[in-house]
Amino acid sequence: MLSDSKKISIRQAGFLFITYIFTTSINLIPIYTSIKAKQGAWLAPIGVIGVFILLSFIWQGFYKQYTNSSLMEIYTDITGRFVGKVLIILHLFWMFLLTSLYLRILIHRLVESIYANVNMDIFAIPFLIVIVYTLRFGLVPLARFNEIVFPLLALVFYMLVALILPNIKIKFLTPVTYRSIIPIFQGGVGILGVFAYFTLLFIVGDKINNKEKIVKTTLQISIFLVLSLTAIISVAIGVFSYKVAQRVHLPFLIAVKQISLFNTLEKIESAVLPFWLLSDFVLICFFMICTLSLLQYLFNLSSTQPFINIYGILLFILSNLVANNFFEIQYFFEDFMIYVNIFFGFILPTLILIIGKIRKKV
């Protein structure tokens, strides 16, 4: 069992979750929801938040019995050694794919928003070098660093929303009628694909304290998530309309470019981009920590330190193969990754809990 100094609190874990889904919410959610729900897209977060809260009850159910266990240990104990190993291998493939995808998204966003026509490798290589160095310090320093990043990120985000409010047109957010209910829930599927990353926290569940407060923490962060996602989508479709939002790259960032304060505050997106890069940094660091934890459990390794550099090189190669442009990333997310995420993040934990109940292990 790890000492408390080598663990993070469930509150810190919740902050990590908010930070690492921020980049996905900015990049992909406005496009997906505007395609599915049109002008009613801004209501999609409200439509699915209940499912996210139910997920917290599922994990709370696991940790009533498995107090100091990781996701891998829980799944293996409930399903048996062979099935457990298969599930861990599948999670490994999932994490490799996710991490390479988000590294590609990060570099695309940086190049398209500021440094057009620049070779992406110029940014990918130094970024990965910093991440690989950071990973040597582990989860606890990352969580402490995020306690600085998260408030700054929230402050900058809501500052931008406040500045752009005059540009939002109500006519682009209405009408919403009873006929919008099904499209709104369809748009919510994309949001569930992001909320599924909550399950990733429990890959390092053995390094998290106070897990008896999972539901309480989830209820608290749910309020912030609903407000933030509603704001992101409202800005994206409220400034240009859903017809434009679903056809452009990074609609939220393009909307931010419309901000002008007394004709003196221009190019604000260049000033706030570093804060969004911090979210990307936390996301990729945490996803790599999860992958290394899966490898450590699968092969019963005493340490993953020797594999960090190798993983960084492999991630660089995979990120160049996963997609050639942002359109491919968007289609890949919409047509494949959303459903894979929902399976691993929602469906699989539910099935494992049911099996655990039947076998009287939970």
Image (tube, rainbow, N blue to C red):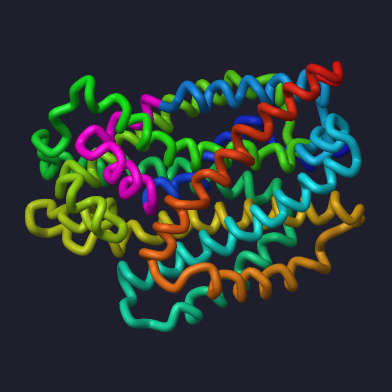
Across and down, in percent, residue 154 comes to 40, 41
Return the residue nearer the eye: 233 or 322.
322
Is residue 23 among what the camera can see?
no
- Tell me where residue 254 sits by quadrant: bottom left
Which quadrant: the C terminus? top right
Q: Is residue 99 magenta?
A: no
Look at the image and give the residue range highlighted in magenta. 27-47
Asked if residue 44 lies left or right of residue 107, the reply is left
Asked if residue 178 lies left or right of residue 188, the reply is left
Is residue 61 among what the camera can see?
yes
Which quadrant: the N terminus? top right
Please report the residue visible at 29 percent of the width from the left and 41 percent of the height from the top.
Answer: 233
- Tell me where residue 80 sits by quadrant: top right
Q: In this picture, is 273 found above or below 14?
A: below
Q: Is residue 36 magenta?
A: yes
Return the residue nearer the eye: 242 or 308.
242
Across and down, in percent, residue 352 comes to 74, 29
Q: In this picture, is 66 found above or below 248?
A: above
Across and down, in percent, residue 290 comes to 70, 50
- Secondary structure that dominates the magenta span: helix
Total tally of numbered discs in the picture: 0
Please report the residue visible at 30 percent of the width from the left and 32 percent of the height from the top.
Answer: 183
Please report the residue visible at 67 percent of the width from the left and 67 percent of the height from the top.
Answer: 132
Across and down, in percent, residue 113 comes to 31, 67
Asked if residue 113 lies left or right of residue 138, the reply is left
